[in-house]
Image (tube, rainbow, N blue to C red):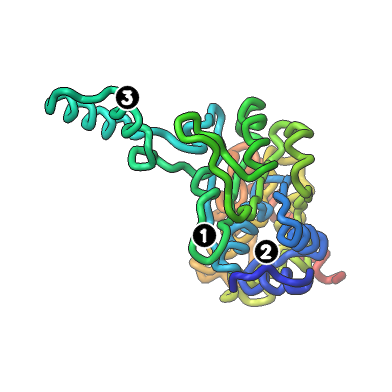
């Protein structure tokens, strides 16, 4: 499929076929971003499925996924393009060896597409087989304000400027998805260019559907215990609460161990799949795991 879905229900069905279970609000804002050609800004805790929606959309629409992984110190050269200095030096040495090189002609030749190293933002402005690509700008909150300011041109006019080559505009705007774990606030100027959605931890029924889609080998009873325990765990005072990604990882770990039902011992042995900080693991191990499991099962009995 390469055409944009014509309704919210089609978007939800399209994502569902890729194993991504979206609630109505997320399906709605995704539909609007696709229909209006606006960037989609997804904010939320790590592991709630922000990055996965970009992968699901690209796969479902048959588009190329171009990912710009953000980090502290990311600059224009790393995001847009760079020049192949090694190849340029070889060309210069070759011209000098031949003698009588026209410096102006040589300079013009050195700064052409032949010596350009394409980075994600420039690649997203190029025509792609199957239609405009999906550009994922992942964890934008890891960058700094100057890079945010640079992004304004790319997200406003879907173009990038390379001093030696000029402005390169996308013939068809890419599908842009930005994600943030909210380690810092993103400037309003960037947010105004996007449709915004907060991706929260899912309710029990939706997380059950996600586990069944991503770990279909798990029995319904085991899946219910896994989801109930993780949801109960998120109510505890932890340094980092487990996301949906950790729920799926834990389900797969338990399946690999041939576990058919949770127990305090199994939980203690596999806590590293759902908790990533030693202080959190020490806090939950032992009697706390048994307490949480009993509370999770009591809640299941009330459903």
Please report the residue visible at 37 percent of the width from the left and 37 percent of the height from the top: 112
Q: Which is closer to the viewer, label 2 or label 1?
A: 1
Is 108 displayed left or right of 67 in the figure?
Answer: left
Residue 55 percent location from the top left of the image:
58, 59
Q: Which is closer to the viewer, label 3 or label 1?
A: 3
Identify the secondary structure beneath mark 1. Answer: loop
Q: Which is closer to the viewer, label 3 or label 2?
A: 3
* Gap in angstroms between the C-alphas marked 2 and 1: 34 Å
Q: Is residue 17 above or below residue 138?
A: below
Please report the residue visible at 73 percent of the width from the left and 37 percent of the height from the top: 190
Is 185 displayed left or right of 125 in the figure?
Answer: right
Q: Residues within 10 Å of mark 2 (few under 14, many from 20)?
A: many
Label total for image = 3
Q: Which residue is mark 1?
A: 64
Residue 23 percent location from the top left of the image:
78, 64
Q: Which residue is mark 2?
A: 226
In-front residue for pair 36/281: 36
Q: Residues within 10 Å of mark 3 (few under 14, many from 20)?
A: few
């Amino acid at each position: 499929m390469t055409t944009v879905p014509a309704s919210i229900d089609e978007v939800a069905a399209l994502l569902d076929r890729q194993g991504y279970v979206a609630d109505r609000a997320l399906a709605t804002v995704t539909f609007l971003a696709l229909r209006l050609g606006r960037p989609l800004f997804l904010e939320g805790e790590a592991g709630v499925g922000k990055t996965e929606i970009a992968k699901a959309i690209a796969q479902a629409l048959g588009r190329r996924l171009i990912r710009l992984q953000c980090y502290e110190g990311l600059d224009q050269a790393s995001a847009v393009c760079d020049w192949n200095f090694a190849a340029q030096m070889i060309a210069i040495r070759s011209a000098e060896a031949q003698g009588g090189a026209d410096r102006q002609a040589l300079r013009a030749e050195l700064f052409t597409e032949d010596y350009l190293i394409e980075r994600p933002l420039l690649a997203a402005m190029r025509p792609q087989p199957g239609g405009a690509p999906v550009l994922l700008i992942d964890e934008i909150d890891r960058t700094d304000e100057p890079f945010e300011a640079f992004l304004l041109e790319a997200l406003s006019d879907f173009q990038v400027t390379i001093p030696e080559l000029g402005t390169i505009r996308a013939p068809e705007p890419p599908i842009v998805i930005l994600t943030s774990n909210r380690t810092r606030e993103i400037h309003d100027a960037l947010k105004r260019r996007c449709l915004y959605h907060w991706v929260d931890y899912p309710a029990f029924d939706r997380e059950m559907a996600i586990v069944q889609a991503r770990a279909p080998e798990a029995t319904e009873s085991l899946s219910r215990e896994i989801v109930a325990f993780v949801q109960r765990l998120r109510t505890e005072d932890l340094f980092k609460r487990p996301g949906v990604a950790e729920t799926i990882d834990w389900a797969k770990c338990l399946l690999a161990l041939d576990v058919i039902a949770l127990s305090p011992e199994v939980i203690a042995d596999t806590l590293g799949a759902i908790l990533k900080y030693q202080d959190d693991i020490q806090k939950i191990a032992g009697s706390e795991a048994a307490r949480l499991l009993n509370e999770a099962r009591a809640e299941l009995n009330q459903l």
